[in-house]
Every structure is written in structure tokens, then in C-alpha cells.
């Protein structure tokens, strides 16, 4: 059996909810990689441009100039925050989708028991698989993504401080 067949069998065993978990997983990791790309490639350019715009301003003490600085910092802040809350939300959603898979799998087990009785464990095995696999998948993916989300949030806080320090008030 090749890998593609094995993967499709695994996804079909987990039921329709496992397909939703797979789609959510792709979205989650896309967003995580996008944020790392931003912090590694795009953020330094944005920070340098904002710092240059601030340095080009001759007045750095008036109320108006401080508002310009706040705007420059706020624009970078918005760029850094983009998708961070969505990543956290998807991490929280994945175990809930897994629990939905548990419920739908148990409904399959109860349907089999209603039609065939409880004396046929083989008939109930598909429902039990559909109940446990999505739960495991949702929890494992969430646990794997939590350190990345935590590091991205720490990086956001650190880089926000660095951005503010790169635009000193004289």
C-alpha cells in the first residue's frame, strides 16, 4: 500500500470531521509560516523605513510630531499583529473539532448498536475509530503549534519595543 492510499484511508477512517481538521491545519501552518516570513523579511524593511521617516522629521518634541511617531509605530504594530489572533483561535479550534469528531463517531457506534446489537464489536470498530482519530489529530496539531504561536507573540512584543526605541524622542 502506497503512502497516498494509506493517508486517504486514515482520513476516511476519521470521518468528515478529520477532513475539516486537515483543512484547518493547512490554514494554521500557512499563517504561521507567513508570520515568520514577515518577521524575517518584511518587518526589518518596514522598521527601517519608519525610522528614516522619523529621523527626517526635524521637530521631535512637539505634540504634532509625537502623533506622527505614534502613527508610524501604530502602522508597524498593525502589520505585526496581522493573523496572530487568528493563529491562536485556530489552535483553540482544533481540539474542539476533534471533540466534534468524537461525538459524530459515537453517533455511528450507537447507530450500529441500534441495528446490530452490542454483540458485534467489529461492526462498532469503524465508529470507535471515527470517534478517537479526530480527537487525537486535533489535540496533537494544537500541541505542536502552541510553541510557534507563543514564540510569534513574544517576537511581536520584542519587536514592538525595538520599533519604539528606534524612534527616540529628543
Image (spheres, helix red, strand yellow):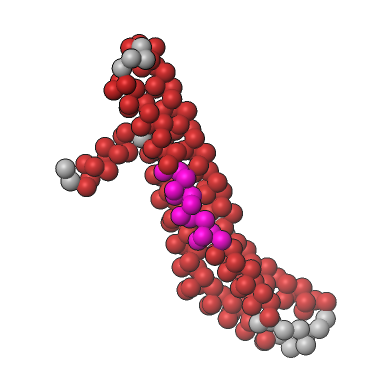
The location of residue 37, given as percent across then percent down, is 46, 68
Per the image, is 27 magenta? no
Instruction: Look at the picture and state if 76 lies above or below 95.
Output: below
Rendered image quadrant of residue 61: bottom right
Name the foreground residue: 77 vs 141. Answer: 141
- Main structural element of the magenta stretch: helix, strand or loop? helix
Q: Position of residue 113 (x, y in %)?
A: 38, 15
145 vs 116: above or below: below
Residue 125 in picture, x, y percent from top left: 32, 26
Q: Is residue 138 visible?
A: yes
Task: Please give left or right for residue 19 compared with residue 48 in the image.
Answer: left
Taking the view exactly as shown, the residue that stands out farthest to the right is 63
Q: Classify 122 as above or below 80.
A: above
Quarter of the image where the N terminus is located: top left
Q: How many marks?
A: 0
Lateral position of residue 58 relative to residue 104, left or right: right
Identify the residue at horizontal 83%, vertical 81% (top origin): 62
Q: Residue 21, can we see it?
A: no
Position of residue 66 relative to residue 136, above or below, is below
* Farthest-out residue, left: 1
Res 111 → quadrant:
top left
Please tell me which residue is depicted at 45% across the width and 31% down the height of the picture. Answer: 102
Q: Nearer the viewer, residue 93 or 70?
A: 93
Left or right for 45, reference 76: left
Instruction: Please name the residue shown 55% across and 46% down the image.
Output: 92
Residue 123, position as x, y percentages in the image? 30, 20
Q: Nearer the viewer, residue 56 or 88?
A: 88
Work out which quarter of the rendered image holds the C terminus and state it: bottom right
Task: Determine the residue positioned at 73% across, 75% down.
Answer: 68
From which residue to which does the magenta span run?
Answer: 137-150
* In magenta segment, residue 147: yes
Of residues 117 and 103, which is closer to you in this image? 117
Amino acid at each position: 500500500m502506497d503512502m497516498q492510499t494509506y493517508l486517504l484511508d486514515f482520513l476516511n477512517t476519521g470521518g468528515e470531521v478529520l477532513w475539516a481538521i486537515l483543512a484547518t491545519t493547512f490554514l494554521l501552518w500557512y499563517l504561521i509560516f507567513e508570520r515568520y516570513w514577515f518577521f524575517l523579511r518584511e518587518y526589518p524593511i518596514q522598521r527601517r523605513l519608519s525610522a528614516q521617516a522619523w529621523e527626517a522629521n526635524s521637530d521631535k518634541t512637539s505634540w504634532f510630531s509625537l502623533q506622527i511617531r505614534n502613527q508610524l509605530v501604530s502602522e508597524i504594530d498593525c502589520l505585526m499583529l496581522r493573523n496572530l489572533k487568528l493563529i491562536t483561535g485556530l489552535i483553540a479550534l482544533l481540539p474542539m473539532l476533534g471533540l466534534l469528531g468524537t461525538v459524530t463517531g459515537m453517533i455511528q457506534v450507537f447507530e450500529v448498536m441500534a441495528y446490530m446489537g452490542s454483540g458485534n464489536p467489529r461492526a462498532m470498530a469503524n465508529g470507535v475509530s471515527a470517534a478517537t482519530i479526530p480527537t487525537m489529530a486535533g489535540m496533537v496539531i494544537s500541541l505542536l503549534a502552541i510553541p510557534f504561536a507563543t514564540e510569534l507573540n513574544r517576537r511581536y512584543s520584542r519587536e514592538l519595543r525595538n520599533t519604539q526605541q528606534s524612534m527616540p524622542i529628543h
